[in-house]
Amino acid sequence: MPKILLTLAALLLPLGLSAQDLTLLSVTDSATGQDYSVKLQILLLMTVLSLIPGIVLMMTSFTRIIIVLAILRQALGLAQSPPNRILIGIALMLSLLIMKPVWQDIYQNAFKPYQAETLSLEQAIARAEQPVRQFMLAQIRENELHQVLKIANEPTTRAAADLTFDVLLPAFVLSELTTAFQIGFMLFIPFLIIDLVVASVLMSMGMMMLSPLIISLPFKLMIFVLADGWSMVAGTLAASFGAAP
């Protein structure tokens, strides 16, 4: 019975809307370009809100930060500490700080003019795209960009200004993965040396049944805290994006 009612409602809804002469989605031409109806703007806004998690992951500094933090936790030998939620929260806060100039540029040059109705929606989106594009281009590596252009069957000599987002985005993500693993490797080396030293000492003492992780973990935590490791990691990540550590 509920399925029948839903089917009848879906069939009668277009008839009711046409009878009342309601236009849900409309686009009108204006002096500044094209204006969208309020309902269409709400629909677009809800669509963008549903894509925000993907946008944060793919177009900001979040990817590099969360990967480095995850590698750091593994290098320390801690399985669940800090928890995933804490790492995600730290990555989000650092991403907000690192991306602050980009957000301010978007707010001043795109959102405020659009709110004041001096720019249309299309013009505001075009202006908001520029600082994001500049940030992504500054982080993209040449090898990754060439590889993405080859996959897209596009010439590898294209200028940066001519790159579309369908090429720019995967190149940026691949570059972020490469940089994150490089930073993670550099963080892993000191802890690996501690593990090797502890394992060698235990073997020389004949204590082969004792796990080296039990002995090395306190030393790694002590050295990391004494070296102010969290501040150093945050500063290194900020400096890797060109921000002041």
Image: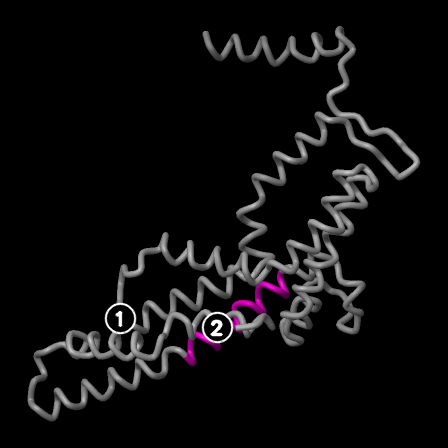
| Residue 182: in magenta span | yes
Which x, y percent locates residue 60? 58, 58
Is 56 situated left or right of 217 in this image? right
Q: Nearer the viewer, residue 98 or 183?
A: 98
Which scheme is used to colour this image of the protein? Answer: one colour
Residue 226 falls in image quadrant? bottom left
Specify the principal SS of the magenta part.
helix
| Residue located beneath label 1 in the image | 77
Left or right side of 92 for 74: left
| Residue 5 image offset from top left, x and y in percent | 52, 8
Report the residue that reaches farthest toward the bottom: 204
**222 and 213: which is toward the camera:** 222
Proximity of marks 2 and 1: CB atoms separated by less than 8 Å: no
Range of magenta residues: 170-186
Identify the residue position indicated by label 2 in the image.
Answer: 235
Q: Is residue 98 above or below residue 115?
A: below
Quadrant of the image for the N terminus? top left
The disc labelled 1 sits on which kind of residue? Gly
Rendered residue at 65%/35% (across/down) = 45
